[in-house]
Each structure stands twice: as C-alpha cells, then as structure tokens.
Image (cartoon, rainbow, N blue to C red):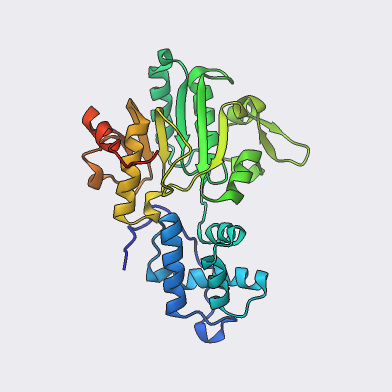
Amino acid sequence: MRDTPPPARPILPPLPSSAAVPPAHREFKFTQQDFERVKKLIYDYAGIALNDSKHDMVYGRLAKRLRAHGFATFQEYLVLLERGNEAEWEAFINSLTTNLTSFFREQHHFPALLEHLRANKAQGTLNIWCSAASTGEEPWSIAITAAEAFDSLKPPVKIISTDLDTSVLKTAQAGVYSADKVDKLTPLQLSRFFSKRADGQYEIRPELREMMTFRRQNLIDPVWSVRGPFDAIFCRNVMIYFDRSTQLRILERFAPLLRSNGLLFVGHSENLYHAAHLFRLRGKTVYELNSPEAKAAGAAPGRGR
C-alpha cells in the first residue's frame, strides 16, 4: 500500500452527495478489487497514489463514466481502460484529478518571483515553466507578475504552461473568467491586464497571451516536451499526488532544467527534505539548487527531459 502525504489543499474536494451514498444503495457494485484496479491504473499512468480513504470518491466520479457508456458494471469499464481506449483514458484522468486554484494563490510566491525577474533583467529572455496550469489562474498570475516586474505588457518572458488534464488546459488557454474568479485582483490589475466583455466576464489581454504556450504534459512520462533552462519552475500542490519515490524522480528531472540561480516554487505544505542533495530552501516554499553538483546529479544518464 502506498501512502500519500497529507494534502496542502483538498486535491480531491469534499465528496459530492452521489459519492457518499452507502454501498448498499449504490447504483453500481464497486468492490475492493475494483478499487485496487483503479489505483493501479492511475498510478501506472500518472503516478497518482490513491489511498483507501478515496474509495467513495472514486466511486462517485467514475459512476458517471459508467452511465456515459451504458455499462452495468465497473468490470466492463475497467476492461475498456485496460484495452487502451485513448479517449476514455483522458476522461478517466480528468475525472479523478481536481483543479483547485485561484489568481495569486499562495500570494507570498509572487513578490519573490517579481524580485527574481527584476534581478535577472540583464540576462535577456527569461523562461518559466508552470507545470500544473489547471484552469489558468496560476500561469496568468505569473504573466501578470512578469508584466509588473518589467512595467510592460510585453516583457522579455516566455511561460510554458502544462497540465495532465486536457479539459482544464482549454479553459486556461481561453483566458476568460467570471467576475467572482477575478475579485481578488486589484482594480488596476483588472483594468491593465483584462478586457471586460459584454457578458460581464473578464478576458486576458492579447499582449499577455504572447508570453504563453500551453501544452499537455504528464510528469511521469519518460520524455518531457519542455526544454530548459528555466529561470523558475512552478510545481505547486502537485507532489501531494505522488508517493515519495515518484516525487524524487520528478525533482531529479527538474534540477537540470533550472538555471544555476533558478527557483523552484512548491505548495505551502510541501517540502523537499528527501531531495536535500538537489534543492535547498531559499524562502517560504521557494527552493534553489543546492549546488552545481546537484544540477549535474539530476542530469544523470537515463533522466529523460
């Protein structure tokens, strides 16, 4: 049994009422064996380690997929996945991952990023990877910070934003948000970085879009589509999905992608004690490379990038 560290945020939010239905009253039978098959599938595919407390949540979310296909049993559904149905794999992953985010969430990170960008202005184009873009609030917060650091809507900054979940990437790329999603931004930020649409929603300015590239990326894939060097990598509240060995493998791959003075931003309850040979704490949940040797260690043969 793999244990998952306590979450920094509810990765899987409070159970919907459908998930809390007692087993005796459920529409579908969902055995422990079914649950173990789900755990293995999502761990092998995405590195996500589910513990037994997620049994009801998994039922509640996947029961919708059984209805969508007209299946009567979980066995039928799991056979579909095991046969490699690509479209259903996408729906399966999207069903079992939750994307809780907001603009300037974990606000202390953004002044640190702003100062880091300002300190490296002479370097030329600065590159940032947001490895869990979710619905876009985080990468667009990074883009706003970059614009503020350079006092320009077109700063010399490029941002690659990735996520495992293709549905949220579409929302992120659209860059359109309801008023309640942007209510924590200042009036100046709203007027400078967004256009208000006729339907009352707010849309990211086209100048900020020029900084951004969106693409799907599974962090446990043997080859990553991103290439460094990066001046900053954001991987916040992502490690809590993974067991310790998977975390370490990902951190070993981050190290060679960072510039020697690059920063790694993680979630507020995440720590890198098990990767102290690679990263050392610089500020509140902000890490830097421990040494040039750490960078080289991360780039050891067999660490695909």
Instruction: Residue 301: give x, y in percent of width and height.
Output: 29, 39
Q: Quadrant of the C terminus?
A: top left
Instruction: Residue 31: give x, y in percent of width and height.
Output: 46, 80
For the question of whether residue 16 can be seen, the reply is no
Q: Residue furthest right?
A: 198
Q: Residue at x 43, y 48 (%)?
A: 221
Judge from the rendering whether residue 277 lies leftward or rightward of residue 176; answer left or right: left
Q: Residue at x 25, y 38 (%)?
A: 278
For the question of whether residue 215 can be seen, the reply is yes
* In the image, residue 172 above or below residue 14: above
Instruction: Residue 205: give x, y in percent of width and height.
Output: 65, 28
Judge from the rendering whether residue 277 lies leftward or rightward of residue 26; answer left or right: left
Q: Residue at x 60, y 27 (%)?
A: 208
Front-most of 263 and 105? 263
Instruction: Residue 115: give x, y in percent of width and height.
Output: 39, 23
Q: Residue at x 40, y 70 (%)?
A: 53
* In the image, residue 291 above or below residue 241: above
Q: Residue furthest top?
A: 122
Judge from the rendering whether residue 178 lies leftward or rightward of residue 16; answer left or right: right
Count of all numbered marks drawn on residues in the image: 0
